[in-house]
């Protein structure tokens, strides 16, 4: 196979785009080219990632609506390519409407939800479950990035995935020395959650900092956030209204958060569910103590020997965990060293890309 065509919803600053770049670079190192079809590109927010992507593959803007796609030259072109040399990889449920279309015309389709299942969303209903079900049913293969990613999905969806699912764990690139550094005397926590209020548990993070304020904890949270949907301004206003400015510092996400000069006591992630978080893996590699929820994705990376784990929904449990985390510097340092040892002994990004490439090879009708 010579080329993989990636259908990717939006190239924006975040773990999803960073994952794609790592994947495409790994393929390129192995001699496989890539084409990326996407609906939008945020050149200002993730210029460095787009630059890396363009070195390894061609990027083209398309509309992810069925009729415009059918009428486009891309549709005819992709139907004509030889499936022995091309494969199609659909990232996320938003892109799978075109995946279903190509499947109807006899093309093999690799579907990767990236942990973001509609039926896991807040207020999910029967239609959300049905959409997930249709995507899995029509996909030739399904790639998930964590063994626990399918937790809480419908039993019917899980049963349908049994014979077509491949687990390919996400990996991180070799890392340069960060300017975000651990200090046992620091009173600052860092959070990197650039979008997704419900999935990232940002409502609980806000409540947690309210409790910190009420109990006069000597603590500051520095949260890097970069949603394009006005959520930054909403969260900023909530922080101001609650007079939380002393405790909760909201910063716009930057291209490389780890290059920001900051001394911290640790890294925090209160996600309700994840794929296999790149930010958590990076925090492990940088030997930062970690306070995290015991959720899908996290528990594939972390256990109680290398992080302080708390309940994904119980804010009181999260607060108790935070107090323990703050008071036991020696223990969090031991756990951080264990986490670093674990993550640095994992396979490389190129290994990850090769694993995914092998999934594409047998994807025949």
Image: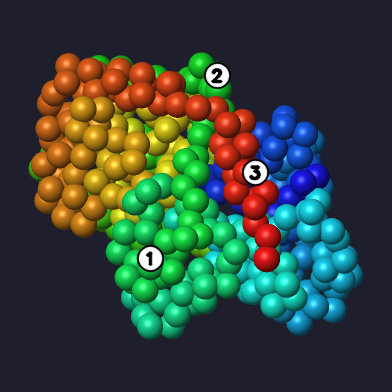
Q: Which mark is residue 203?
A: none
Q: What SS does tag 1 mark?
A: helix
Residue 36 in sight: no
Q: Is residue 231 left or right of residue 149?
A: right
Q: Is residue 55 left or right of residue 45?
A: right
Q: Is residue 59 left or right of residue 110?
A: right
Vertically, is 237 above or below 44? below
Of 342 and 68, which appears nearest the observer? 342
Badge 2: residue crowd in 10 Å (few <14, some 14–19, many ≥20): few
Badge 1: residue crowd in 10 Å (few <14, some 14–19, many ≥20): some
Residue 110 in sight: yes
Q: Residue at x 77, y 65 (%)?
A: 62
Relative image position of residue 115 (x, y in whole percent): 44, 56
| Label whose residue precedes the other's in the sequence (1 or 2) | 1
Q: Residue at x 37, y 73 (%)?
A: 156
Mark 3 — residue?
357
Viewer-side label of 1, 2: 1
Q: What SS does tag 3 mark?
A: helix
| Label whose residue precedes the other's in the sequence (2 or 3) | 2
Relative image position of residue 294 (x, y in whole percent): 24, 46
Q: CA distance from mark 1 to mark 3?
A: 23 Å
Q: Residue at x 46, y 47 (%)?
A: 167
Q: Which mark is residue 176?
A: 2
Relative image position of residue 103 (x, y in whole percent): 68, 72
Q: CA distance from mark 1 to mark 2?
A: 39 Å
Q: Residue at x 68, y 66 (%)?
A: 365
Mark 1 — residue?
158
């Amino acid at each position: 196979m010579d080329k993989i065509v990636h259908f990717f919803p939006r190239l924006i600053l975040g773990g999803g785009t960073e994952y794609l770049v790592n994947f495409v670079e790994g393929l390129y190192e192995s001699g496989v080219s890539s084409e990326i079809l996407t609906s939008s590109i945020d050149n200002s927010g993730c210029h460095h990632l787009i630059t890396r992507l363009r070195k390894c593959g061609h990027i083209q803007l398309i509309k992810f609506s069925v009729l415009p796609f059918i009428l486009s030259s891309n549709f005819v072109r992709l139907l004509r390519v030889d499936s022995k040399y091309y494969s199609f990889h659909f990232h996320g449920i938003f892109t799978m409407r075109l995946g279903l279309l190509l499947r109807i015309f006899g093309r093999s389709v690799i579907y990767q939800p990236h942990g973001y299942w509609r039926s896991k969303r807040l207020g999910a209903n029967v239609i959300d479950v049905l959409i997930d079900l249709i995507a899995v049913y029509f996909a030739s293969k399904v790639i998930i990035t964590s063994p626990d990613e399918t937790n809480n999905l419908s039993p019917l969806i899980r049963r349908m995935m049994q014979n077509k699912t491949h687990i390919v764990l996400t990996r991180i690139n070799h890392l340069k020395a960060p300017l975000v550094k651990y200090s046992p005397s620091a009173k600052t926590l860092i959070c990197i959650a650039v979008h997704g209020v419900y999935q990232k548990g940002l409502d609980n993070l806000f409540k947690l900092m309210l409790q910190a304020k009420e109990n006069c904890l000597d603590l500051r949270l520095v949260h890097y956030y970069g949603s394009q949907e006005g959520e930054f301004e909403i969260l900023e206003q909530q922080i101001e209204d609650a007079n939380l400015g002393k405790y909760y510092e909201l910063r716009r996400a930057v291209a490389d958060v780890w290059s920001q000069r900051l001394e911290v006591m640790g890294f925090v992630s209160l996600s309700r569910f994840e794929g296999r978080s790149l930010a958590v893996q990076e925090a492990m590699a940088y030997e930062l103590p970690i306070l995290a929820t015991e959720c899908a994705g996290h528990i594939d990376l972390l256990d109680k020997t290398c992080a302080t784990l708390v309940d994904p929904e119980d804010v009181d449990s999260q607060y108790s965990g935070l107090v323990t985390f703050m008071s036991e510097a020696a223990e969090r340092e031991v756990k951080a060293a264990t986490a670093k040892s674990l993550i640095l002994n994992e396979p490389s990004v190129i290994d990850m890309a090769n694993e995914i490439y092998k999934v594409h090879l047998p994807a025949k009708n």
